[in-house]
Amino acid sequence: MTDDAELLRWRMHAQFADGPSGVAEIARRCAGVQAQDAGAVRLALRARGLRDPAAVQAAYAAGEVVATWLMRGTLHLVPAGDAAGLLALYRDRLLAGGARRRRELGLTEELCARALAVAPGLLDPPPGRAELIAALRAHGVPVEPKGQAPAHLTAFLAAHGVLCRGAEVAPREPGYRPLPAGRELTAGDLARGYLRAFGPAAPADLAAWSGLPQATARAAFAAAGAVETLPGLSVLPGSAPPPPGPPLVRLLGPYDGYLLGYRSRGLMLDPARAKRINAGGGVVRPALVADGRVLGTWRTARGELLVEPFEVLPRGVRRGLDAEVEAVGGFLGEPLSLRLEDPA
């Protein structure tokens, strides 16, 4: 019988064990990367095998990956060939979910229809958002250039498949490019990708991660051929727990998908410590994770990587942490020394 520790270890190996290390390959292996913050994207990919941070921009520029609004209505980096198929699963929910706010911002049906008509001709070369909004205004789309209207209009255009985010056109300024054509995907395909990255899991976990209804998640598990391997939890056929070995330790960046992948974090994170990771307002802090359990938070400052553990770290976890500190420093291009605070 698998206990909680073994279950968490299985889940963490599904997400973080060694595998292909290209940006698109990692994005496919972990079912997409939360992408509302450029720095967080790079750290998420690093924790899953990426060694060169410049590879992210290169993958965008080569058209291997794009970012658009998908799971839970949030931005995700995904393989370019999967973006259109995933968007088809979410389009109606995205448009319905943003309708009220668009009206509040003066984005009328007439204005949005005009934007849909002219935006496809404004994406070569890819513009940044301010440049895109200026071009739309010049073509008779009277969107207010300040405030939240530009963000909601670009999300509306993205939901219709007109555009998506690609390579940066300036530091921390993504360019908008046409959504590439891709393969059709079903909810069963989404469930297969989710189970590869997050299993063992339940349909309720898929619903929480994806933002799709519970009934859709249950049907998607069935379509994916999910096999119940633990009470209420399923995997893909042929999946097996990892072999025994030293703790798998990772320093995860903010908004990491592992912390957003299940209906509840109660198994991975002591509820008494939950506000140390997510104090509210949608902010998810960087976390030290070992064999699936969240053991503390971390940050960098003045050549140090400061870890605030929740408890005394076992010796095996400490060895893994030393290796992670070196890896993070190499990835960020600055040697970092570990500063380990007393548990609190």
Image: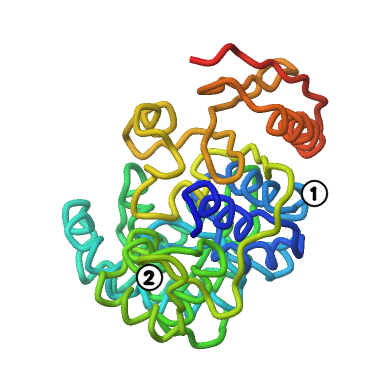
Taking the image as shown, residue 288 lies to the left or right of residue 283, namely right
Q: Which mark is residue 32?
A: none
Quarter of the image for residue 196 reads bottom right
Type of the residue with mark 2: Ala
Identity of the residue furthest to the top in this view: 342
For image coordinates 66% across by 52% down, the residue present is 45
Residue 228 picture quarter: bottom left
Examine the rendering and report whether any part of residue 93 can be seen.
yes
Measured as percent of width and height from the top left, residue 146 is found at 35, 43
- Which residue is located at x 71 percent, y 15 percent? 302
Say if 195 sits above or below 311 in the image. below
* Of 168 and 211, the residue lying toward us: 211
Which circle marks residue 159 in the picture?
Answer: 2
Residue 216 in the image, given as x and y percentages of width and height: 29, 77
Q: Which residue is mark 1?
A: 51
Q: Quadrant of residue 290?
A: top right
Dot 1 or dot 2, earlier in sequence: 1
Residue 330 sits above or below residue 181 on the image = above
From the viewer's side, name the closer residue of 219 and 24. 219
Q: Amino acid at mark 1?
A: Arg
Q: In the shown orientation, is residue 248 left or right of residue 205? A: right
